[in-house]
C-alpha cells in the first residue's frame, strides 16, 4: 500500500497532493478574505454572502484583474 502525502487547507478544508498548489490556494483564499473585508467595510448595503462571493471571484481571477487595472479592462470579459 502506497502512502500519499496530502496537504489540507485549513480555510476551506480542500485537500492537495502538491504543497505548492496548497499554498497557492491558501494565498488565493487569503486575498479573497481581504477583498471581502474591504467590500464589507466600504459597501454597507452589500450582504456578507455577496461580499464573499465577489471577493472570491476577484481572487480567483487576480491575474486578469491586475491586467485590467494596468490598462487592459477588456480582459475582464474573460471572467465567466
Image (cartoon, rainbow, N blue to C red):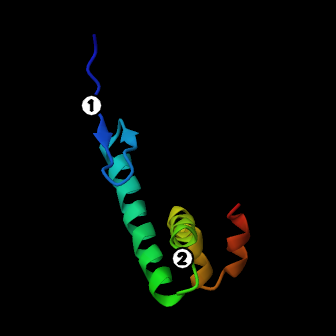
Q: Residue at x 58, y 85 (%)?
A: 45
Q: Residue at x 73, y 69 (%)?
A: 77
Q: Nearest the camera: 24 or 36?
A: 36
Determine whether, in the image, residue 62 is placed left or right of residue 10. right
Residue 54's place in the image compared with 14, above or below, is below
Residue 1's place in the image compared with 75, above or below, is above
Q: Nearest the camera: 47 or 73?
A: 47
Q: Label 1: few (<14), some or many (≥20) within 10 Å?
A: few
C-alpha distance separating marks 2 and 1: 34 Å
Residue 18 position within the rendered picture, expressed as x and y whole percent measured from the top left: 34, 40
Which residue is tagged 2?
66
Q: Residue at x 26, y 31 (%)?
A: 5
Name the image quarter holding the C terminus.
bottom right
Determine whether, in the image, residue 43 is placed left or right of residue 6. right
Work out whether mark 2 precedes mark 1 in sequence or the reverse, and give the earlier one: 1
Residue 75 position within the rendered picture, expressed as x and y whole percent measured from the top left: 69, 72
Which residue is tagged 1?
5
Identify the secondary structure beneath mark 1: loop
Residue 25 position within the rendered picture, expressed as x and y whole percent measured from the top left: 40, 54
Which-is-in-front pick, marks 2 and 1?
1
Identify the secondary structure beneath mark 2: helix
Amino acid at each position: 500500500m502506497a502512502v500519499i502525502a496530502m496537504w489540507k487547507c485549513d480555510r476551506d478544508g480542500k485537500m492537495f497532493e502538491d504543497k505548492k498548489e496548497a499554498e497557492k490556494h491558501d494565498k488565493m483564499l487569503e486575498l479573497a478574505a481581504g477583498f471581502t473585508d474591504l467590500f464589507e467595510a466600504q459597501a454597507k448595503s452589500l450582504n456578507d454572502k455577496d461580499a464573499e462571493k465577489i471577493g472570491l471571484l476577484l481572487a480567483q481571477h487576480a491575474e486578469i484583474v491586475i491586467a485590467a487595472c494596468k490598462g487592459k479592462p477588456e480582459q475582464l470579459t474573460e471572467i465567466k
